[in-house]
Image (spheres, helix red, strand yellow):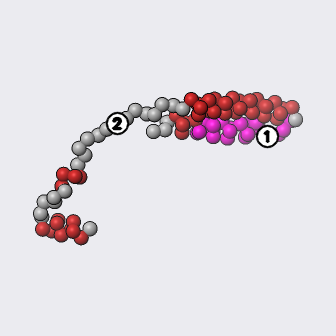
Amino acid sequence: MFPDLVRLINRRPSTDYDRGFVRAVRTSRKPPRNPRVELILKLGWTLIMLKSVAVVWLFEHYHVQVSALWVIAPTFVFGALCTAVYLLRD
């Protein structure tokens, strides 16, 4: 910090002045999607759908006074969040 302050006060050009600039930018493609992870996601969504059907049937069959969406909605939201994190990764 102090050498930079002294250099600023003395107005001498820095010897490493050119190092502060970007010389090149390299980009790379996204890594390919992992088929195993995509299979797990598909299985997870299948289980979420089966659970949703089972919950609706059970709530109607046993006359539960709570909406089935209280159970289904959080499951769906967290599944969508996990899927979005995987699909929108860097």
Q: Quadrant of residue 8?
A: bottom left
- Say whether residue 45 is visible: no
Q: Of the residues tagged 1 and 2, which is closer to the observer? A: 2
Residue flagged by tag 2: what amino acid is it? Answer: Thr
Q: Residue at x 84, y 38 (%)?
A: 64
Q: How many neighbours does mark 2 have within 10 angstroms: few (below 14), some (14-19), or many (20 or more)? A: few
Magenta extent: 63-82
Q: Residue at x 16, y 58 (%)?
A: 15
Q: Quadrant of residue 52?
A: top right
- Say whether residue 62 is visible: yes
Residue marked by disc 1 = 66
Q: Is residue 58 magenta?
A: no
Task: Report, in whole angstroms, how far the alpha carbon at label 1 lies from the one at label 2.
Answer: 52 Å
Quadrant where the N terminus sits is bottom left
Residue 78: x, y in percent? Answer: 63, 40
Residue 69: x, y in percent? Answer: 72, 37
Label 2 secondary element? loop
Q: Main secondary structure of the magenta part?
A: helix
Residue marked by disc 2 = 27
Residue 57: x, y in percent? Answer: 81, 30
Q: Check residue 45 in the rendering and tell me which mark sits there, or answer none.
A: none
Q: Is residue 19 left or right of residue 33?
A: left
Sequence-wise first label, 1 or 2: 2
Q: Is residue 42 left or right of residue 17?
A: right
Q: Residue at x 45, y 39 (%)?
A: 90
Q: Is residue 40 left or right of residue 62?
A: left
